[in-house]
Amino acid sequence: MENQDQMRVLVVANQKGGVGKTTTAINLGTALAAIGETVLIIDLDPQGNASTGLGIDRKHRKVSTFEVMTGERTLDAAIQATAVPRLYVAPSTLDLLGVELAIANEKDRNYRLRNALRAMAGRNALPNGERITYVLVDCPPSLNLLTINALAASDSVLVPLQCEFFALEGLSQLLSTVEQVKRSLNPGLTIHGVVLTMYDSRNNLAGQVVADVRAFLGDKVYETVIPRNVRVSEAPSYGKPVLLYDLKCNGSQAYLKLASEVIQRERNLRAA
C-alpha cells in the first residue's frame, strides 16, 4: 500500500471456519485502538459477524462493503464509528454473496478493495480528522474473490490458527495462495504472523499443536497465544469486543499482548 507510514493494511485470513478469525479481527482491532492506534475493520464476510460483534445493527448498515466493492459508493461512505474510541468499521451485508457475479467481467475485479483504500488514503476519511493507522480486513472462510481482493490490497497476512489436531491442514493451501497473489497481484505481500487461538492448557493435544506449529513456522508464529475463554465467546452476543465486555479476563489481556506484539513487528519491518 502507498503511504505505509500512515496506514498499514493487514488481512485476517484462513479458509477454515471456526478458527477465531473474526474474533481476532474484532479484538485485535479493539486492542490496537486501546493503545492509541486509529483502526478500521473492513468486514468482507457476507455473514457480517465482525459488524454484529462491534454492535452495528443490520438495519443501520445503509452503505456496506458490497457497494464499495461494486464501485457504487466510496469506502469513506461505508465507515461507521463503534463504541470503542478510535475504532471504526465498514460493515457487510448478505449482498456480498453476489459480488462475484456483479464484478466478474470487470478488468479490475481483483483490485476493487485496493483501489477503494488508495482513494481513502488520499484524504481525511474520518469526519473528526483522525488518520487511520491500521486497517484489518476480515475475510470469509474461503479462498474466493473477496479474499483475493483482500490479499491484493494488503501489506501483510495475519493467520489465526486453532489449537486442534487438524490445525495445519489447509494452512499450506493458504500459504500457497498468498505466494500466488504475491507473484501475480501484490509483490509486496508478506506473512505478518500466525496467531494460535482457542488454546486450552488442560488439553495435552493443544500443547503438542503449539509445539508442532512453532517447529513448522518458526518465528512467524506470534509469542502470544489466545486462550479458550468463555468471556471471549460471550462478548459478540452483546455486540461488544471482549475488552469492553470484560477487560480483566484472560482473553482480553491476551489480545492486548498480541496488539503490542503486532506493533513491535511493524517497527522491526520498517527498520529492516
Image: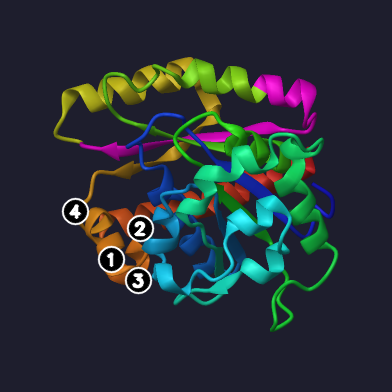
- Disc 4 residue type (three-letter): Val
What residue is drawn where x is 78% and y is 23%?
A: 184
Q: Residue 193: horizontal and vertical position, in percent?
A: 55, 35
Upstream in the sequence, badge 2 or badge 3?
Answer: 3
Measure the C-alpha gap from mark 4 to mark 1: 13 Å
Measure the C-alpha gap from mark 4 to mark 2: 14 Å
Read off the residue under disc 2. Answer: 253
- Disc 1 residue type (three-letter): Lys
What SS does tag 2 mark?
helix
Q: Residues within 10 Å of mark 2 (few under 14, many from 20)?
A: some
Read off the residue under disc 3. Answer: 244
Q: Residues within 10 Å of mark 3 (few under 14, many from 20)?
A: some
Q: Residue 190: horizontal and vertical position, in percent?
A: 68, 32
Upstream in the sequence, badge 4 or badge 3?
Answer: 4
Q: Nearer the viewer, mark 3 or mark 1?
A: 3
> What residue range appears in magenta?
179-200
Measure the C-alpha gap from mark 4 to mark 3: 14 Å
